[in-house]
Amino acid sequence: MSMLQGMMSKQILGSIVLVLGLAGCSSLTGGGGGSWPYATLDGKRPLVIAHRGASGALPEHTLEAYHRALNDGADCIEPDLVFTKDGVLVDRHDTWLSTTTNVASKPEFASRKRKSTDPEASDREDWWVADFTLAELRTLRAIQPFRGRPKTYDNLYAIPTFDEVLDLALSRQTVAGNPVCVYPEAKSPAYHATVGHPDMAEKILAALKAKGLDKKDSPIFIQSFEPPFVKKIQPMTDVPVVMLVGDRAALDAAMKVEGAPFWDGLGATHQMLFDASGKPTSLIRDAHARGIAVHTWTYRDDAPFKGEDTETSMKKALALGLDGFFTDFPFTGYRVVNEVALGTAPE
Ligand code: G3P
Ligand code: CA
């Protein structure tokens, strides 16, 4: 398909969706209508969550990648959050900088390279976000970390703050004309507490409140892999909080924490939806029985799971009643959801 054909297909599809009022993000599972064919928690269509922005096309966690994600049909944009030295929440997946920025090419920062104090990156020698002020980080530019993805946009885009992402969201709408949902992840709150930033929950909530995005119906989900953080922040806010789990053992461990489940949504790897023989697990059914939505990660067009193309993986997950999913390629997710909604998904 040519680029022009692709753009036209997208415009036509977008028009159909606008007419039917299908896309959206108005509740925990999002969706503007009750016509979704599968048993999501609220019967609405699932959310397409742009993982680190449209990170398959542009360097991740840049304003440009978030804009592109919304142009491509995402309901939500996902900023991973870490702290600068001067206590500003900025968007990076890693606590270090060399994977996603051009810091290694900056002679003025050469002496900053050092061994890690982050237990999740214990053997790493790198440049660390927590050693840089916001002003210093602003001199860096993002690069594409994934092999095989376009490097054309390297060295162009700055690291955004969380505030800037919220402003971007408030300045835009989804393709279907709904408010943009923001899905911030608190990265490594326990580590940040050891480098002078014990207040990640308070800072995230203050940023949301300052923008009027702290209400029960605000299009926000807060996520974390750390059960203590989820347990702490959930009663502090009216917006939904999502417990991230990388496997069944992590879910079982979180469930053993007193008061569990203390989350409104579960963010699980998509591998947890099926057992080794390919049979669906009870993950979604069990969560829904407790009133908990399930969002899975991460679908990548260029990294199919067990040789299965990504669209097939998405469709099989959606058929289980999945409430939303993270993808590096939001246009693929948008198209798949629309095809299922419209009954035009090829077998
Ligand atoms: O937050 C959902 C998913 O993004 C978790 O994986 O490592 O890409 O942040 P990660
Ligand atoms: Ca994330």
Image (cartoon, rainbow, N blue to C red):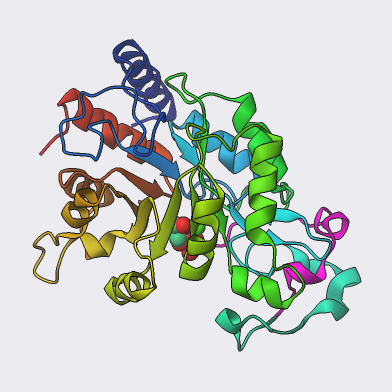
Residue in the image at 81% along x and 71% along y: 131
- Look at the image and give the residue range highlighted in magenta: 126-146
> On the rendered image, what quadrant is the N terminus found in?
top left
Quarter of the rendering containing residue 175: top left
The percent coordinates of residue 335 (x first, y second) are: 31, 33
On screen, residue 262 versus residue 121, left or right, reads left
Taking depth in this image into account, of 108 and 334 the one nearest to the observer is 334
Is residue 233 located in the magenta-colored stretch of the structure? no
Residue in the image at 86% along x and 59% along y: 136
Q: Residue furthest top?
A: 19
On screen, residue 44 versus residue 236, left or right, reads left
Where is 31 relative to 106, above or below? above
The answer, for residue 237, to whether it is visible in the render is: yes
Mostly what secondary structure, the magenta segment? loop
Is residue 136 located in the magenta-colored stretch of the structure? yes
How many marks can you see?
Answer: 0
